[in-house]
Every structure is written in structure tokens, then in C-alpha cells.
Image: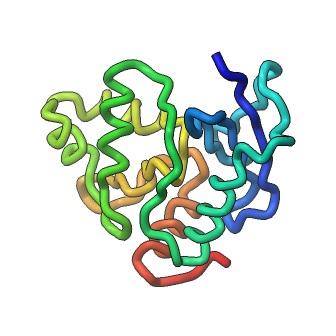
Amino acid sequence: MDPLYYARTEDSPVGPLLLAGNAHGLRVLSFGVGSRPRAIDPAWLPDTKGVLKSVRKELDEYFAGRLKAFTIPLAFEGTPFQNQVWKELTRIPYGETISYLELANRIKNPKAVRAVGMANGANPIAIIVPCHRVIGSNGSLTGFGGGLPTKRALLELEQGQRTLL
């Protein structure tokens, strides 16, 4: 198995980010602050080869409001159910939101709303796998690993209400 490389982005408009991936794809994009900041795995190697350069470039374009669809390869690592939910998250169009119930319906499992919420919360690739686009059925912003102000900022960026860069 190829080693994972990591990089930290300290100057993102939403605070520090941790990236990890290899030639097969991005596996981790985690907020450095919030309810679930991820630590660097001791098996990961610093990205001195520029493996994550394209991820950083696309994130910069996204934060500037110029990128609406990410093209970098993703390498999901989760249960089959989590992978199904995460793949469906990538199908939510830029600037749109859906509820957890709608997400459960889209994966043809309408009774799995809580499980969908848990899978959404376990998403290891924030922003690019847009778990921030999932909101409560009543339109309220609900839990987000990067914090609700970050979720609000990302949604406002995508709805053309603000810029982050």
C-alpha cells in the first residue's frame, strides 16, 4: 500500500486544515479546530513531494468563489454504508442544501436518517465531500465538525453571499 502524505494549511479562510492522501486520492481533509480535529497519524509522511499540491490549488479556487466542482480524486475509507453516504454527498450541487431525510431518501434508505447523520458526521473529507450542505428538515444548521460559523460561511460562499478570500 502506498504511504499517505500529509500537509497542514494554516492560512485557510476557515482556519487550519489537515490534508492527507496519496497518488490514489485524498483521504483526509480535517479542520484544525472544532469538535473533531484530527491528529497526524505517525505513519503518515510529510508531503515533501507535492502530492497534495492540486488539493491546495482547488481549495484556493473554491474559497475564492471560482471553483464549483472539485476534480481531485478521493479515496474513501469507511464502511460500505458510510461510503454510500459520502458518495451521495458529492452529488449535492454547489450552492444547494438538503436535509438528512432527503439524503436518506437519495440512498434509498428513508428509515436510516440517524445512521445517515452519523455517517455525515464521520465524513473524513470535509468541504470537498460537502457534508456542510446537509441541514435540518426545518432549515436549521445542525452539527458540523468545523463549527456552525464555518458551516454558515461555506454555505454563504456557495450562495454568493460572501467571499472567503
Q: Eyeballing the image, is 154 above or below 39? A: below
Q: Quadrant of residue 44?
A: top right
Q: Residue furthest top?
A: 1
Q: Quadrant of residue 106?
A: top left
Viewer-side residue, 105 vs 84: 84
Viewer-side residue, 31 vs 42: 42
Residue at 59% x, 53% y is 147
Residue at 56% x, 37% y is 25
145 horizontally vs 135: left or right: right
**Quadrant location of the C terminus?**
bottom right
Viewer-side residue, 53 vs 6: 53
86 horizontally vs 38: left or right: left
Q: Eyeballing the image, is 98 above or below 145? A: below
Residue 5 in picture, x, y percent from top left = 75, 34
Residue 72 in picture, x, y percent from top left = 52, 50
For the image, the number of numbered tags is 0
155 horizontally vs 98: left or right: right
Residue at 59% x, 71% y is 61
Residue 70 in picture, x, y percent from top left = 48, 58
Q: Eyeballing the image, is 46 above or below 150? A: above
Q: Quadrant of residue 54?
A: bottom right
Q: Which color scheme does this rendered protein use?
A: rainbow
Residue at 57% x, 45% y is 145
Residue 95 in picture, x, y percent from top left = 36, 70
58 horizontally vs 110: left or right: right
**Quadrant location of the N terminus?**
top right
